[in-house]
Image: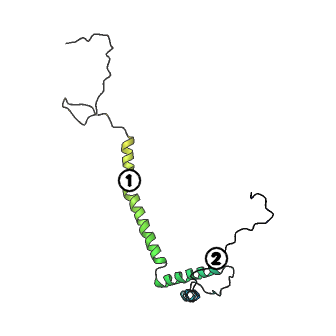
Amino acid sequence: MGFFSPYKRHANQFSYTPRYYDPEKEAREQRRAELRGERSDDTGEYTPGKYIRTQREAREQSRAKRKSNGLGGSTRFISLVVVMLLVFMFVYVLVPRIGAIFDMATTAPTAVEKTTDDFDPYAPLIIVPNDYVEGEELVDIE
């Protein structure tokens, strides 16, 4: 029975040894990253904020490069003007038409008076209530 034992059992230990570690490749990647400007002060020892600082520096460099190429604020301004023109065209062209559709739906059609005996298929139908009561006999009046 394994409930009570006079010997103390230790937890399993995890020992990891990397199989494919190449120190030359690691040094090569570090040099390339420094040349690209991704890691500026990668001396091997961690200093607080080191990775955040290098990312910020890389972002600032890319923004400066874009601004020097002329792709900074001018494209943003042009795209903003195009979007504003599209919104204005939508409001100017479609909104009055949509409003007219709602106006047509809310107003009741006016009654058209019949002046001729000809059949008009566009005239509204006149519904006459039926006064017939069941049980009474129909009488033809001539």
Outermost front residue: 1
> In the image, is 100 to the left or to the right of 77?
left
Classify mark 1: residues with Cα within 10 Å, few (<14), some (14-19) or many (20+): few
Between 52 and 14, the one lying in front of the other is: 14
Give SS at disc 1. helix
State how the image is colored.
rainbow
Q: Amino acid at mark 1?
A: Pro
Measured as percent of width and height from the top left, residue 113 is found at 27, 31
**Distance between mark 1 and mark 2 Cα atoms:** 72 Å
Q: Quadrant of residue 55?
A: bottom right
Measured as percent of width and height from the top left, residue 138 is found at 26, 12
Give SS at disc 2. loop
Quarter of the figure that contains the N terminus: bottom right
Q: Quadrant of residue 109?
A: top left
Q: Residue at x 43, y 70 (%)?
A: 81
Q: Amino acid at mark 2?
A: Tyr
> In the image, is 83 to the left or to the right of 129?
right
Q: Residue at x 38, y 51 (%)?
A: 98
Quarter of the figure that contains the C terminus: top left
Q: Which residue is mark 2?
A: 16
Measured as percent of width and height from the top left, residue 35 is found at 55, 89
Q: Which residue is mark 1?
A: 96
> In the image, is 28 to the left or to the right of 118?
right
Sequence order check, earlier mark of 1 and 2: 2
